[in-house]
Amino acid sequence: MKKLVIIAAMFMAAAGVKAQDCEAIMLPYFNGDMQRLTTYRNMAPEKYKYRCVFAQSAFYESDTIPAGVEVMDISVVKNLTTGTNLSRNISIDLSTFSFYAYNFSEIQVRNNSVSEQTCFSTPASDHPYLVLRSAKEMEQAANRYWEEEILKANNNR
């Protein structure tokens, strides 16, 4: 049953992934350096896309708290460039909101959520909760993308 829930969540994530701006969510990975991003994307397009899909699968918004998940205030999230914490009044736009711009990986490790989701209260957003998927779920989504791309490449030979 747990596998079915994870598969369903990944399917929903993949459906939502299409609207996210890969460049916007990847730019923080390169510390805002567009030249480095462009060079990386051109030299290693598969790795670039893998990292993008990893970041795209990081979040989903929810109107309810996932079962068994503790809710944290979004203000505990810190911008890695400025060092400032997010405002409680932030309105999340998943098309440009970047996993790489904030200390989400630190939060995953600190809260032992490498395999668990973390939920943040975002009352100013369209949905009151931002859910950070586990690192394991994010990796599974990126790996699934990678496997699909390899299958496509093999089928086009």
Image (cartoon, rainbow, N blue to C red):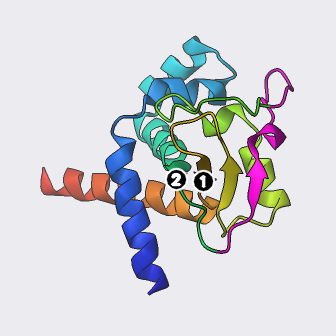
The image quadrant of residue 145 is: bottom left
Estimate the x, y position of residue 70 in percent, counting from the top left. 74, 64
Q: Quadrant of the N terminus?
A: bottom left
145 vs 67, nearest the viewer: 67
- x, y (%) of residue 156? 13, 50
Give the left or right position of residue 122, taking residue 52 as reference.
Answer: right
- Compared across the picture, whether 42 is left or right of 26 comes to left
Q: Residues within 10 Å of mark 1 (few under 14, many from 20)?
A: many
Q: Earlier in the sequence, mark 2 or mark 1?
A: 2
Identity of the residue drawn at 59% across and 18% down: 36
Q: Report if the CB atoms under discs 2 and 1 are less than 8 Å apart.
A: yes
Q: Which region shows up in magenta?
A: 68-85
Three-letter code for the amino acid on which mark 2 is drawn: Ser
Q: Is residue 43 visible?
A: no
Question: Can you say whether 114 is above or below 26 in the image?
Answer: below
Q: Which mark is residue 131?
A: 1
Query: Dominant secondary structure of the magenta stretch?
Result: loop
Residue appearing at x 62%, y 53% in the figure: 132
Query: Residue placed at 52% from the left, 48% from the top?
Result: 61
Image coordinates of residue 77 in percent, x first then y, are 78, 39
- Name the residue tied to disc 2: 62
Q: Secondary structure at mark 1?
A: strand
Q: Is residue 30 left or right of residue 111?
A: left
> Would you say residue 132 sits in the magenta stretch?
no
Decide which of 32, 66 is in the foreground and name it.
Answer: 66
Disc 1 marks which amino acid?
A: Val
Task: Using the numbered discs, state the Cα–Cα distance from disc 2 to disc 1 in whole angstroms.
Answer: 7 Å
Q: Secondary structure at mark 2?
A: strand
